[in-house]
Image (tube, rainbow, N blue to C red):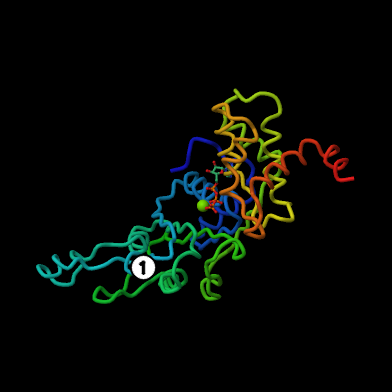
Amino acid sequence: MVSKSKIIGREIELLQLKKVMGLNRNILIEGPVGVGKTFLVQQGLLDLKKKFERIDGDTRYTEQKLTGWFDPPIVLKKGYSKDSFIEGPLVTAMRQGKVLFINELNRMPEAVQNILLPAMDERRITMPKLGELEAKPGFCVIATQNPREFTATHALSEALLDRFEMIQLDYQSREQELLILKQEVSSKLKGNVLERLVDLIRATRNHTQIKRGASIRAALAMAKLLEIGLEFEVAALMALPSRIEPISSEEDLRELILNLISLNEFPHLVEKKKN
Ligand SMILES: Nc1ncnc2c1ncn2[C@@H]1O[C@H](COP(=O)(O)OP(=O)(O)OP(=O)(O)O)[C@@H](O)[C@H]1O
Ligand SMILES: [Mg+2]
């Protein structure tokens, strides 16, 4: 469940999420890696004390896993009935009026996504041998996904998109990112080290050689390394290469990161060197 940390900023998005959830409507939260999509949904569910079933989308997820399946040994004894059916999260959420929270929906195979269609607008699904199931009030789907350019996954079908209200999240402001870090790390870190860290992370998002920059999750990881006493450069070289994606695989990430650190800290020197 959600950590003890409180949500910083995102007041408007949290309010929208809760209001739409109150209408039992389906919501899609879209935004780059690590901007706080999962965190926002968890906070909304917690605030409204909503019961939910969570699924993490992956490319090998199956239709059966989503709805449920018949257990062969029980079928042999009792035949096809409710007793021999092992419920999947969709059926449980519909039957009990819970929220179905699907993290990274666009990583799910299309066939699995399609199962959701009738559940999301007609609020019913038909299951072979069991018949029709109608969703109890309270059932809705909340999903998260990264924008298409960030992942190698398929875009959601038009039919699926048509059943969602959308909330888009972008990176937070410098001040908010600093507050998130201050909430998570001990006060042991001296001086302006957190400011330096936030500026470095934000600079990765505007760099011409970088396709996908680092998020607040990367900043939190680097802060933990600083807390155990690692040097700023060392921590950056450990925390960032796996969390940024260069435009070209030829790029030397190490050099790129060190260069960004000096650019951030000594912009005048770097300018002079160039001349
Ligand atoms: N608004 C916020 N307030 C406080 N902490 C936040 C906030 N947004 C993000 N965080 C912190 O950043 C971490 C990463 O956020 P989260 O896992 O929700 O990102 P995400 O968008 O779901 O990423 P992904 O695309 O990888 O699934 C959280 O665990 C939390 O510690
Ligand atoms: Mg997430």
Q: Quadrant of residue 81?
A: bottom left
Frontmost residue, 43 versus 112: 112
Frontmost residue, 178 versus 87: 178
Residue drawn at x 57%, y 30% as measured from the top left: 185
Q: Is mark 1 within 8 Å of ligand 2?
A: no
From the viewer's perspective, tell me whether residue 116 is left or right of residue 198: left
Name the spot of residue 9 as percent of width and height, x first.
64, 43
Provide the secondary structure element on which disc 1 rests. Answer: loop
From the viewer's perspective, tell me whether residue 186 is left or right of residue 259: left
Q: Is residue 75 above or below residue 235?
A: below
User: Which image quarter holds the N terminus?
Assistant: top left
Residue under circle 1? Answer: 62
Q: Quadrant of residue 100?
A: bottom left
Name the spot of residue 61 as percent of width and height, x first.
38, 65
Disc 1 crowd rating (10 Å Cα; few below 14, some 14-19, many 20+) is: some
Frontmost residue, 157 versus 261: 261
User: Which image quarter holds the C terminus?
Assistant: top right
Q: How many marks?
A: 1
Frontmost residue, 187 versus 1: 187
Q: Quadrant of residue 198?
A: top right
Name the spot of residue 109 as percent of width and height, x first.
44, 70
Name the spot of residue 254 as percent of width and height, x first.
64, 45
From the viewer's perspective, tell me whether residue 275 is left or right of residue 93: right
Q: Is residue 47 above or below residue 140?
A: above
Q: Is residue 203 above or below residue 106?
A: above
The kind of residue tagged 1 is Thr
Residue drawn at x 36%, y 72% as measured from the top left: 125
Farthest residue, direction left: 77
